[in-house]
Image (cartoon, rainbow, N blue to C red):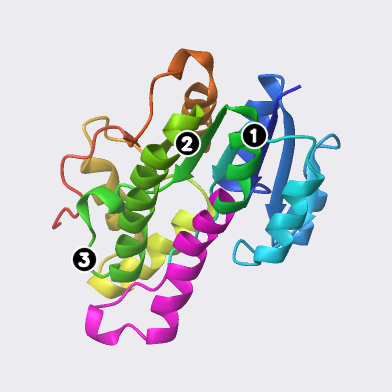
Amino acid sequence: MKQVLITAGASGIGRAMGAAFEAAGYGVWITDIDQKALADCPYGWQRCTADATDEAAIQELITRMPHIDVLCANAGIAGPTAPVEEVALEDWRACMAVNVEGAFLAAKHAAPGMKARGTGAVILTSSTAGIYGYPNRAPYAAAKWAVIGLMKTLAMELGPHGIRANAICPGAVEGDRMEGVLEREAVAKGMTRDAVYAGYAGGTSMQRFVEARDIANMAVFLASEGARLVSGQVIAVDGHTENPDPKL
């Protein structure tokens, strides 16, 4: 049975990935810091309470896996919503640590096993913020651009070993995390939450938010034989963003 490791896999996009990979016949291994959410995950999933930046915990979990076919480095935090001059250094560093270092550590420790088997797929969760940038979200945008740089390098470095690397860039995804972003952005822009929501949706050709399952379905495709020569790609799943920061 193929095995997938998903960081931040107990809720949101990560949990949707777990369900999609399980449906595709994979053994599912997840990490998360939310113990309640971990406890609520399906019985057959292998679970580990671990911060994405805890190298020892990530390494130990990977060594427990029979092998690793797919890595979904999905852990991330939204960071602050504020003009750059108001962003605290500790908030900048925290955003970089989870979003960038977390992806790096997972890839670092997944790579040896994949190399030994001559196959594997590394899927990093970036964001449309990693394509366009976003005002008042400097730490998050910078981190997600860095994730794409990491992915491009992994694709080049690991490709000769039969390992592919790609980045998925979700747009605005329905869920609790996005609700927090909407509320903070509403305060920063002096707008209502509903107006910010309409701006995000209206900035896409499809005029709607993304669902976690849309990201999960793309991840399963990128891990499949159907994507056997897809590597080094930045793939937006966002309903086609036309205007990343609509001024309403």
**Which residue has dot 3 on it?**
135
Packing grade of label 3 (10 A; few <14, some 14-19, many >=20) is some
Residue displayed at 38% across by 60% down: 182
Packing grade of label 2 (10 A; few <14, some 14-19, many >=20) is some
Magenta-drawn segment: 79-107
Answer left or right for 152 relative to 50: left
92 relative to 180, above or below: below
Residue 94 painted magenta: yes
Answer left or right for 181 relative to 77: left
Q: Which mark is first along the chain, 2 or 3?
A: 3
Work out whether residue 106 or residue 201 is closer to the camera in this orientation and state it. Answer: 106
**Quadrant housing the N terminus:** top right
**Which residue has dot 2 on it?**
211
Determine the residue located farthest toward the top in the rendered image. 226
Give the residue type at disc 2. Glu
123 relative to 144, above or below: above
Q: Which mark is first along the chain, 3 or 1?
A: 1
**Which residue has dot 1 on it?**
116
Q: Where residue 117 appears, x then y in whole percent?
A: 64, 29
Q: Which of the 4 image quadrants contains residue 170?
A: top left
Answer left or right for 115 relative to 205: right
